[in-house]
Amino acid sequence: MIVVIAGPTAVGKTKLSIELAKKLNGEIINSDSTQVYKGLDIATAKVTEEEKQNIVHHLIDIKDITQDYTLFDYQKDCRKKIQEIQDKGKIPIIVGGTGLYIKAALYQYELKEENKKEEDCNLSTDQLYSKLLKIYPETKIHKNNRKRILRSLNYYQHHHEILEKNKTGDQLFYDDIIWIGLTTKRETLYQKINHRVDQMLEDGLMEEAKNLYQKKIRTKAVMTPIGYKELFEYFDHHITKEEAIELIKQRCRRYAKRQYTWFLNKMNINWFDTDYENFDNTIQEVLNYINSFYE
């Protein structure tokens, strides 16, 4: 059995994954494309050592921010971890918000190794999107989805093929998968996102971003997550601190909306409402659903 926990940012995926791992004898595999990098902790909402509660986590902090990490790399690494966890008699629990990572790992998604480094990461999102339109005018990728635009351009650069035309990912690579999605009312989620950003600032997001800014690191790893590039604009005196914070919140909300759309359209997920007042209710509801497969 493989358990997948998907959903938008700030909906409670991390907490649910840890509680399920404790109750199901599981280990957690990260499927957030930004949490694979060392040093990007606060803006990526990376699970802390305290939050882990001694549950083993995989594919977190495995790359330096100057290194490349592709969809091909994740597919290979995740499948390897699934096998290792199952060989120990434990249950792999894949959790995160990068839907394409989950699909690449769990579906028969044919990918090719990408060896060259990104060359476009310093371009604006508008510039990147214009490049993509010249290559593939029929693209369905949203013009603000920098991560997917970069990935498509990178794939085309290496293979002279359009990643979006890869239709091999319609069949599952594994048989026994339980799909869990967490959801809540949009207004509630947006409030949670705004609060999370405020908490990130209290936890040292400004200092984390300043450290990267002063090192002049502008790799894909740094420029992809929401949080750093917005504060870089503030450090460059292009916008005020208040404008940067509001921009982070706004982009996080838009990102959550895109995540919902992607999961709803690409995967057959069973959705559960997050009970923020009593999260144990959510845990029990999900456990009951999982146990129903084995009664």
Image (spheres, helix red, strand yellow):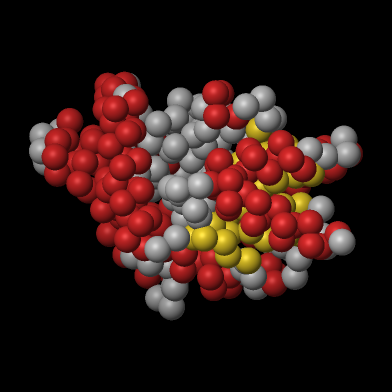
Q: Quadrant of residue 102?
A: bottom right
Taking 275 as reference, is 27 above or below it? above
Position of the C terminus by quadrant: bottom right
Can residue 71 be seen? no
Residue 97 locus on image (x, y percent): 52, 52
Which residue is depicted at the point 27% across and 59% down?
126
Q: Nearer the viewer, residue 285 or 40?
A: 285
Q: Quadrant of residue 14?
A: top right
Q: Nearer the viewer, residue 278 or 242?
A: 278
Q: Tell me: 204 left or right of 7.
A: left
Taking 91 as reference, is 256 above or below it? below
Q: Tell me: 196 left or right of 95.
A: left
Which residue is depicted at the point 36% across and 63% down?
186
Q: Tell me: 250 left or right of 148.
A: left
Residue furthest to the bottom: 138
Which residue is depicted at the point 58% across and 65% down?
271
Q: Nearer the viewer, residue 155 or 30?
A: 30
Total tally of numbered discs in the picture: 0
Residue 4 locus on image (x, y percent): 67, 54
Can residue 180 be seen? yes
Q: Tell me: 264 left or right of 235.
A: right
Which residue is depicted at the point 77% across and 43% down?
24
Residue 210 locus on image (x, y percent): 27, 24
Residue 155 locus on image (x, y percent): 54, 56
